Amino acid sequence: MKTARDNQEQDTWGAIGIGAMIVFISLILVAAVASAVIIQTAEKLQQNAQTAGDDTSDELSGKLTIMQGFVDANDDYVLYVRLAAGSDTIPATSISWQLFCDAGNGYEDSTTGGFAAANVQLQSVSQFGAGQATMAIQNPYKILIAANTCDATQVAQSAGQEAQLFIHVESGGTTFETLSVSSPDTGTAVI
């Protein structure tokens, strides 16, 4: 036969069980809050990485690679270019250029301009004319840079015989090249 003990010591077992349950529930709540913070941080990092990747892709996928350059008969520059690897089709009007050179008086002059379809031609076509409205990755092109201040004669007569060329693609990247003009004669290589 079993004897029942109704003393104070037996009541403490229930209190210990309730205390353990409270600690267990609080641990679950803390873990839930911590996991929510970790998930939110991971989502924010993923969004930042996606944005950075998209920006990098845009910059690299809209860029020109300069293969060669020459002086033409009008003291301008003809550059042979291709779109950089992975580039999308680029409208010719979305490309602009800046040319900096020594003016001979101790400071740099600059010439800026944009391209129209007439300034962009397939490399296989001998003359600039109607030109190309868009540039695609599969074709090599030649572009005409008609410089006012930094033409081939000015640069060839300057102390350094160099001009710095920047070609900017709207919503894309920038290409930099130094043009070395030893002579303003037609056909002189500048790159």
Image (spheres, rainbow, N blue to C red):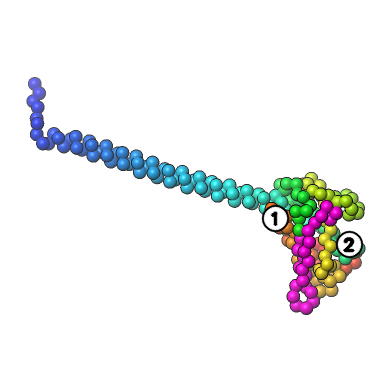
User: How far, Cα to Cα, is label 2 from label 1?
Assistant: 26 Å
Mark identifier at residue 173: 1
Q: Nearer the viewer, residue 104 or 117?
A: 117
Q: Which residue is mark 2?
A: 72
The amino acid pointed to by label 2 is Asp
Examine the structure image and report whether residue 98 is included in the region drawn in magenta.
yes
For the N terminus, the image quarter is: top left
Q: Which residues are magenta?
A: 97-121
5, above or below 131, in the image:
above
Q: In screen coordinates, is 23 left or right of 121? A: left
Which residue is the extreme one toward the top? 1
Residue 75 is at least partly visible in this image: yes
Crowd band around label 2 with a 10 angstrom C-alpha radius: few (<14), some (14–19), many (20+): many
* Identity, as a three-letter code, of the amino acid under mark 1: Gly
Please provide percent x and percent y for residue 139: 81, 47
Q: Quadrant of the C terminus?
A: bottom right
